[in-house]
Amino acid sequence: MSHDTQEVSANDAHARGPLLLLLGSGLVWLVLSGVLALIASVQLHTPTFLASCAWFTYGHMQALQETAFVYGWLANAGLALGLWVLTRLGGEALRAGNWVTVGALFWNLGVTLALVGIVAGDATGHSLLQLPRYVQPLLLIAYGAIAVAGVLAWSGRRNETSYASQWYVFAALFLFPWLFSVAQLTLFVLPMRGVMQAVIAGWFAQGVFTLWLAPLALAAAYYVVPKVTGRVLPAYQFASLAFWVLIVVGAWTGGRHLIGGPVPAWISSLAIVACSLLVFHYLVVWLNLKGALGHGGAVMKFTAFGLLAYVIGGCADAFTSIRSFAVITQFTYFTQAQQQLALYGGVSMLFFGVLYFAVPRLTGKTWASAALIGGHATTAILGVLLLVISLGVAGWTQGQALLKPAVTFPEIAAATRPWLLLATAAYAVLLVGNLMLVVNFLQTLAAKPTVPAAALFQATSDIKETA
């Protein structure tokens, strides 16, 4: 584990406080979301569980889990790792660190208030936007405070040449406020009427993944893979084209969630075409980052699995957007399987890999326990596989049965129950793995530095990514 502290620089030491605050906050939300997901999963196959308490109904638990996972864990971790990559590639110390700290505190305060509001019955009911209306402006302002550091890192970079990692982070920093503010305006402030609300909600939900979370994950992966493998990215000349395909086409895929719904047919048709176009993006990402496969170490294990999940999930979206398949999978557990494959299998696993790479460099310490790292890798991979497969089979079974008028709902519930039980076991496995990560993170912070303070400032700050 001694190699984990190589390339520790003065810039890393300068960014340590704000970025570790974001990462630590994200890990707290990760564990909480795991507990909430486990409760919600139990309620799917055992409706009597906590049925006597109105605060803990399935609707509340699902909204709480989704909010804590996306806006708690993924947002905090993605912003921390994105800013870290920008400062490293820019060759300058993190500026506006106090803004990041204040923004992180108010962002997590907003997420806490959102969970309280959801329990009180103030959830909006829109996927990936369950946040109560009164919390959304606070989150937007807090996000702006954090993004200031990213803008300064981009504008103050020492090298004119920019890298794929920088493109993705900078795009994510700007596109999320645009998505979030447009959704607030058109859904809550000056709400659109009728079916347009469903169209906008689908556009926002898809945009959160394709224009915010996925770019942050890809930025981290594009930085770490060549660093660890020491290899040139084989299709880097196409990286810019793949980037623009994702940014321009990504949000248009939201209409695939509305296939068969009471919306104009051109909306879903456009989404099908957009999903097909995105296959080019996934192909380029695969060609560039496939070097992570077969490479040893925890960083590459998580990164390789996250890459596979991201590419397979994107291709599955294109495949299931075809109407003949959407008729079966739409509005079933299969859509949950796709969402978990994208958010947990793709984005979260990539964040895990880069987190294991970044923390030793931010702290100047090696990870406290190699055993906990191995345990987390095993449980995370096993848990995601079990979760996606079980929900996918349950959804396919459910979809096939719903097309048969003679099959009753109790029969459908009985047929899917074994798979939902397996999904619950998967959530339990993931929770155990996440606890291992949190324990290891806290032990690492409490340990003595393995890199002398003087050595931190002897390392060069002009750190470049090899394309």
Image (spheres, grey):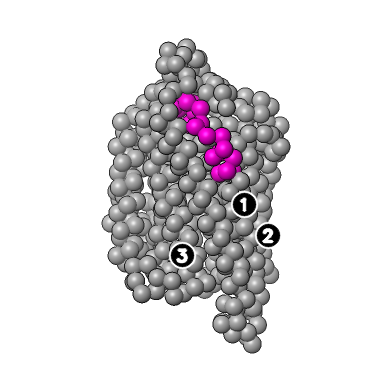
Asked if 333 appears above or below 159 in the picture, the reply is below
The nearer-to-camera label among 1 and 2 is 1
Is the N terminus in the top left, top right, bottom left or bottom right quadrant? top right
Q: Name the residue: 59% across, 35% down.
A: 299
Q: Residues within 10 Å of mark 1 (few under 14, many from 20)?
A: some
**Residue 346 location (% of width, % of height):** 58, 48
Image quadrant in which you'd find residue 276: bottom right
Q: Name the residue: 41% across, 55% down.
A: 67
Q: Name the residue: 62% across, 28% down.
A: 228
- Residue at which label 3 appears: 40
User: How many discs appear?
Assistant: 3
**Residue 409 location (% of width, % of height):** 56, 82
Residue span colored magenta: 358-377
Asked if 243 appears above or below 159 in the picture, the reply is below
**Distance between mark 3 and mark 1 Cα atoms:** 20 Å
Residue type at mark 1? Leu
Q: Name the residue: 34% across, 71% down.
A: 53
Is the C terminus in the top left, top right, bottom left or bottom right quadrant? top right
Asked if 287 appears above or below 84 in the picture, the reply is below
What is the secondary structure assignment of the residue under circle 3?
A: helix
- Mark 1 or 2, nearer chain start: 2
- Residue at which label 2 appears: 319
Image quadrant in which you'd find residue 154: top left
- Mark 2 or 3, nearer chain start: 3
Residue type at mark 3? Ala
What is the secondary structure assignment of the residue under circle 1?
A: helix
Q: Main secondary structure of the magenta part?
A: helix
- Residue at which label 1 appears: 382
Does residue 434 show up magenta in the picture? Answer: no
Residue type at mark 2? Phe
